[in-house]
């Protein structure tokens, strides 16, 4: 009885194992390679699949989603013999599970080595400056070569990105110094442009100010001259309207004499010859009044005032020599009065 039970248990276990091997569930975006006696039979897609147990076997399960693989920095020599380290990232996707399984032993390693060799070929034809500024060009060239080479492996390279391009330390120091010098140069140029613009604006302002000031002074001078002309006309009209006689004119001459003699440094001054006639009329007017008048030297005999009192009727013979009726230059002397 016991051997029968053991056989039944073994049969149940075998049936359970057969069911497990018969029913294969493949996840979405995945594929499985089925081999029968070591030979490729078919590719299982996502969903429930039935295989022959103990005859068919699952060789490989492949993820059909896009994969991202970063590669370590690779030393690359540029055209100007400088070594730079370049990090790359590959975005790829398996499009044919059978080719990815049977056409290449390890497509990840194959893609890495192909990337390194292609990158060296591309960078070898560029100098350092172009390498640093042509990432898009390098990415496009690298992707084109990889996509063409990996097509027969059932791999599609979607994108290639350069993570970093690191030149040598000495080159980095030189680049920093060059960048600093360029920034200093641009700053100096901008400062000079600002100073130049400021000086131009200042000169323009001074020019406009000088023009306005000159226009103002011109208008002021014109108005001043017009006012003086108006004042002269008014005085002239007033004098003619008043009909002045010889006595008034003589008195005006006498009022002007102190102004002519003003100042301590005035030792020599000119008297018009016409003032003699005015003084004759004025001396006659003062004689009629009966008062003492200052003496005037009408004959021009002396300048010390000794004969200057001849012109007055009751004077004390008084002043310094003042007038030469012919308009000659005479010297003014200050002498004490004689009592």
Image (cartoon, rainbow, N blue to C red):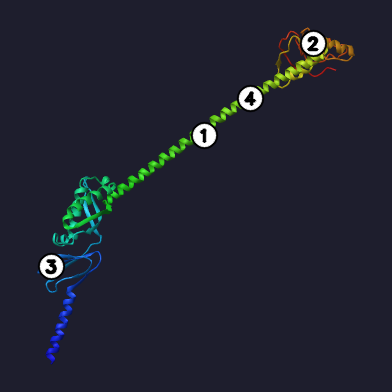
Q: In which quarter of the image is the N terminus?
A: bottom left
Earlier-in-chain disc, 4 versus 2? 4
Q: In this view, does 140 lie above or below 59?
A: above
Say which residue label 3 marks. 35
Image quadrant of residue 93? bottom left
Q: Nearer the viewer, residue 161 or 188?
A: 161
Image-based side of 273 in relation to 52, left or right: right
Image quadrant of residue 275? top right
Q: Where is residue 193 in the image (x, y as percent from the top left)?
A: 44, 37
Q: Looking at the image, is mark 2 or mark 1 nearer the viewer?
A: 1
Earlier-in-chain disc, 3 versus 4? 3
Q: Looking at the image, is mark 4 or mark 1 nearer the viewer?
A: 4
The span from disc 4 to disc 1 (Cα, nearest Å) is 25 Å
The span from disc 2 to disc 1 (Cα, nearest Å) is 62 Å
Q: Which residue is drawn at 83% across and 10% down?
A: 281
Q: In this view, does 224 lie above or below 70?
A: above
What element does badge 2 sit on?
helix
Image quadrant of residue 103? bottom left
Q: Residue at x 20, y 53 (%)?
A: 147
The span from disc 3 to disc 4 (Cα, nearest Å) is 113 Å
Do the residues bearing badges 3 and 1 touch, measured as CB atoms within 8 Å? no
Can residue 309 be seen in this snapshot?
Answer: no
What element does badge 3 sit on?
strand
Q: Where is residue 237 in the image (x, y as percent from the top left)?
A: 77, 16
Say which residue label 2 marks. 278
Say which residue label 4 marks. 219
Q: In which quarter of the image is the C terminus?
A: top right
Say which residue label 1 marks. 202
Do the residues bearing badges 4 and 1 touch, measured as CB atoms within 8 Å? no
């Amino acid at each position: 009885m016991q051997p029968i039970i053991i056989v039944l248990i073994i049969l149940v276990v075998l049936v359970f194992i057969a069911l497990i091997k018969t029913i294969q569930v493949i996840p979405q975006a995945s594929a499985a390679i089925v081999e029968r006696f070591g030979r490729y039979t078919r590719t299982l897609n996502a969903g429930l699949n039935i295989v022959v147990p103990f005859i068919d076997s699952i060789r490989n399960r492949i993820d059909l989603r896009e994969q991202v693989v970063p590669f370590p920095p690779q030393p690359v020599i540029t055209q100007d013999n400088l070594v730079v380290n370049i990090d790359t990232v590959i975005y790829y996707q398996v499009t044919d599970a059978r080719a990815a399984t049977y056409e290449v032993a390890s497509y990840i390693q194959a893609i890495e080595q192909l990337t390194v060799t292609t990158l060296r070929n591309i960078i070898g034809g560029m100098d350092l400056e172009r390498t640093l500024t042509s990432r898009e060009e390098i990415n496009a060239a690298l992707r084109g070569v990889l996509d063409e080479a990996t097509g027969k492996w059932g791999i599609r390279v979607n994108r290639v990105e350069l993570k970093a391009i690191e030149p040598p330390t000495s080159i980095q120091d030189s680049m920093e110094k060059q960048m600093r010098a360029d920034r200093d140069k641009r700053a100096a140029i901008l400062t000079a442009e600002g100073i130049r613009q400021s000086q131009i604006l200042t000169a323009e302002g001074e020019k406009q100010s000088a023009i306005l000031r000159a226009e103002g002074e011109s208008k002021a001078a014109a108005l001043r001259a017009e006012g003086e002309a108006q004042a002269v006309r008014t005085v002239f009209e007033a004098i003619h309207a008043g009909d002045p006689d010889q006595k008034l004119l003589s008195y005006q001459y006498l009022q002007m004499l102190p102004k002519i003699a003003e100042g301590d440094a005035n030792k020599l001054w000119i008297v018009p010859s016409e003032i003699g006639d005015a003084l004759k009329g004025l001396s006659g007017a003062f004689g009629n009044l009966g008062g003492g008048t200052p003496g005037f030297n009408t004959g021009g005999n002396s300048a010390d005032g000794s004969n200057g009192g001849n012109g007055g009727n009751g004077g004390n013979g008084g002043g310094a020599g003042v007038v030469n009726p012919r308009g000659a230059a005479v010297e003014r002397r200050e002498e004490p009065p004689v009592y």
